[in-house]
Image (cartoon, rainbow, N blue to C red):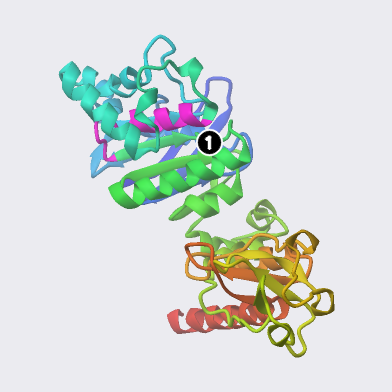
Amino acid sequence: MIRMDSVSKRYPDGTVAVDRLSLEIPDRAITVLVGPSGCGKTTTLRMINRMVEPSEGTILLDGEDVQRQPVTALRRSMGYVIQNAGLFPHRTVLDNIATVPRLLGWGRRRARARAAELMERVGLDTSLAQRYPYQLSGGQQQRVGVARALAADPPVLLMDEPFSAVDPVVRKGLQDELLRIQDELGKTIVFVTHDIDEAVKLGTMVAVLRTGGRLAQFAPPAELLSDPADAFVEDFLGADRGIRRLSFFPAAGLELTTGPVVPVDATAEQLAVPDAPYLLVTDADRRPLGWAEPRELIAGDIRPERLLPYGRPFTPGADSLRAALDCAVLSPTGWAVAVDADGRVTGVVSQQSIAEAIRSAHAGARDDARVAG
């Protein structure tokens, strides 16, 4: 565990970057530091590995004061990932990843074998091993940065806005990859971001810092969204925090209906679905093609090009109520399409049914809170 007791950082000009910060960062979990610009997130992170020395207070790593540890050994015991990866431009991908093991005295063959293993773990094709950083995309460079930080198998991983310089699609992929790696390796990760969505998605615990480096709230993401500590935290979370909270309610309990689902070669009898304003047409493998009003469909001659788009489907066993609601809102019919892991339709659900599930989920959460209290 990393423990920070009344840690402050003051500069000679009087600037207070971090002010009496106390945190207990749990082992084998992702703790996210989030807050507005100038709140001391990066300074806090850098004080853990002594890239910045605290002005006062104590930082303990597994009960030992980091100030009493040799700074070089301390830094080599922690992985460190920064924005834009910070790779050595004159070294290949393989040798970038092997940097810390080589510094620790590993032989070249052993270090490179470890680097090749980590390339696969972070989702990099091994054919990239002899390329240089400038030959990689931004997302690939960040994966190399993560692999390099993991190379010596450190128990602690410090990540300073590592995904902020890539586009949203790549960023989501990197977030998912980090969660997968963490599930496999169980590192103690301290992650800095200014993006509350990223904090909520990745964090086991989230520390919200105020401008001036004071702690506003330290809580699991679900608690943060349901019970912000004060007006500052509530404002920082944004007006759509209720939508974000739905990420913690599974979609598995939604009542799906298969009545409005018909195959592309449907007969007249199959098209005669009572009280169905729209029908979802699927292909021969039961994958969704699109929506149409029943009166527009002709038995045995359904033309996919005339169908309305079905939006983005969700998977009940893997996705949340937020994902299901998003799918329903994006659908031109107001119905969300549910699919299995292979993309085959398992049913559809209306916005009204999702709203009922949301009300039930909130009621259940209130009951649980009363019992816990």
Q: Residue at x 62, y 63 (%)?
A: 313
Determine the secondary structure under disc 1. Answer: loop
Left/right placement of residue 360 relative to residue 299 reads left
Q: Main secondary structure of the magenta part?
A: helix
Q: Which residue range is magenta in the image?
A: 139-155
Residue extending farthest to the top is: 90
Q: Can residue 41 be seen in this view?
A: yes
Q: Residue at x 66, y 53 (%)?
A: 232
Left/right placement of residue 328 relative to residue 115 reads right
Please, is residue 39 above or below residue 352 in the view? above
Q: Residue at x 55, y 40 (%)?
A: 171
Please, is residue 157 above or below residue 220 in the view? above
Camera-nearest residue between 367 and 118: 118
Camera-nearest residue between 363 and 230: 363
Please, is residue 140 above or below residue 335 in the view? above
- Amino acid marked by disc 1: Phe
Q: In which quarter of the image is residue 278?
A: bottom right
Please, is residue 103 above or below residue 362 in the view? above
Residue extending farthest to the bottom is: 274
Label 1 crowding class (10 Å Cα cut-off): few <14, some 14-19, many 20+? many
Q: Does the magenta stretch include residue 258?
A: no
Q: Is residue 152 magenta?
A: yes
Residue extending farthest to the front is: 300
Camera-nearest residue between 248 and 129: 129
Residue 88 place in picture, x, y as percent: 41, 14
Q: Quadrant of residue 115?
A: top left
Residue 123 place in picture, x, y as percent: 40, 38
Residue 22 place in picture, x, y as percent: 42, 47
Name the residue that disc number 1 marks.
163
Q: Is residue 3 visible?
A: no
Q: Residue at x 53, y 62 (%)?
A: 343
